[in-house]
Image (cartoon, coloured by chain):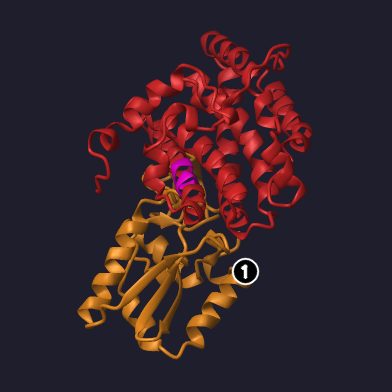
Chain colours: A orange, B red
Amino acid sequence: MVSAARRIELVPAEETERRARRDCSKEPELWALLDAVTDPEIPVLSLWDLGVLQNIERVGHRILVTLTPTYSGCPALVTMQEDIRARFAEAGLTDVDIVQVLSPAWSSQWLSQAAREKLTAYGIAPPGDERCPHCGSSNTHRVAEFGSTACKAMWRCDDCLEPFDQFKAI
Amino acid sequence: MDARAAAYAIGLGDDALVLGQRLTEWCGKAPFLEEDLALANTALDYIGRARFFYQAAGVNTGRSEDEIAFGRDAREFTNHLIYELPRGDFAFTMARQFLIDAFMVPFLDALSTSRDEQLAGIAAKAVKESRYHLRRSGDWMVRLGDGTDESRQRTIAALDTLAGYVDELFEMDSLEAELATDGIGVDRARLKDAWQRTVARVLEDATLPQLATGWNVSGGRRGIHTEHLGHMLSELQFVQRAYPGLQW
């Protein structure tokens, strides 16, 4: 079994580009501001960690935020947009436009190693990881393909007997 | 997106909205909690797709997604008939879902190479969801077909009813043929072999008889529907009909 620490992180090309947009941005303080905006249903992951936050730019005097949804019908996207506007407003920034793009299509592979560790600590198994986030056992089974939100499936540990969510690999 | 591609997108959006609405009818009524969640989540994926297709079409026609979804009568809906059939029992819902998932995977895969960037973007996203849906609906066919006598009989009855509605999925009208030639739309007829292979393999695993052929109906893309669509729309569109233009 490959332990979490030794897992080799294969970063998809579109995720490398997303990280480069942030690293090369002339507005690092705007990105830092939005690090406080989290997924309303998984509050340990920021929109950046999740891969939903694709870009932040200044266009003239306005701020343009680009998001991509996780799943086509993810109802959290509306709340995310409201939370982004609220966060900028706290910093006195109100000229904000938010656009949604579908390409490249979101992938659970965009979650960084740090994001995967945050999920495990929160009690959600990261995508592709079938170990119980509570006791670490690999003696688990999937109960259902879908769970409490669009991005999760239901699993149960056959050692500690606790149910847990797994972030779907897509 | 030009007017032809917009009409095409509305047809695909209608397919997604109508099936999504049928799936939402299970919310709170599914056989057990896990399935309730699964059906509702699948419905969300479909309604999300409908919104993307309508938004893409609306940019050209100046109509909002709400106007497209709630402001048209049954004859203006261009969904294929299989999507509008009543949800039936659980076996019927899963058998339809399986036949559609097996179609959606190659269809969306092909659409993801469309020359229209918006259609390609929607399809590239949705095909990932449909692959996931197919795994679940295929598993259910095996559980139901190779399950109890009752689950088996109900599944056979469902497939028997659905068999006459699948040919329409592979029919090309003149608009679709034109868009396929232009590299914008998908040539549905070419997908039938892949679809048949998936269906035949899963039905065999499920110890179910293969789909019977011999009769088929069509008309959805021309606005000719079963009686069921109007009843469904009366519920789907009620709020906007009673309070036109209402915003949440």
Query: Of helix, strand and loop, which one carries label 1?
Result: loop
Residue A6 point in image, percent of width and height:
58, 71
Residue A122, percent across and down?
35, 60
Identity of the residue drawn at 50% across and 21% down: B85
State whether the magenta stretch is mostly helix, strand or loop.
helix
Q: Position of residue B79 (x, y in %)?
A: 54, 32
Residues in magenta, as a range:
B46-51
The reply to whether the magenta stretch includes residue B48 is yes
Vertical arrangement, residue B65 with respect to residue B235, above or below: below
Q: Is residue A137 above or below residue A119?
A: above
- The front one of B75 and B31 is B75
Q: The numbered mark 1 sits on a residue in which chain?
A: A
**Residue A60 placement, left or right of B1:** left
Near-viewer residue (B81 or A90)? B81
Residue B133 visible in the shown view: yes
Q: Does B125 appear in magenta?
A: no
Residue at position x 70%, y 27% in the image: B199
Question: Front-most of A14 and B8?
Answer: B8
The picture places residue A13, in percent across and down from the top left corner, at 63, 72
Q: Badge 1, how many Cα within 10 Å: few under 14, some, many 20+?
A: few
- Rendered view: A136 above or below B9: below
Q: Point out the residue furthest to the bottom here.
A: A26
Q: How many marks?
A: 1
**Front position in the image: B128 or A96:** A96
Q: Quadrant of residue B193?
A: top right
Left or right: where A160 falls relative to A51 = left
Q: Which quadrant would residue B152 be assigned to in this image? A: top right
Residue at image mark 1 = A12
Q: Amino acid at mark 1?
A: Pro
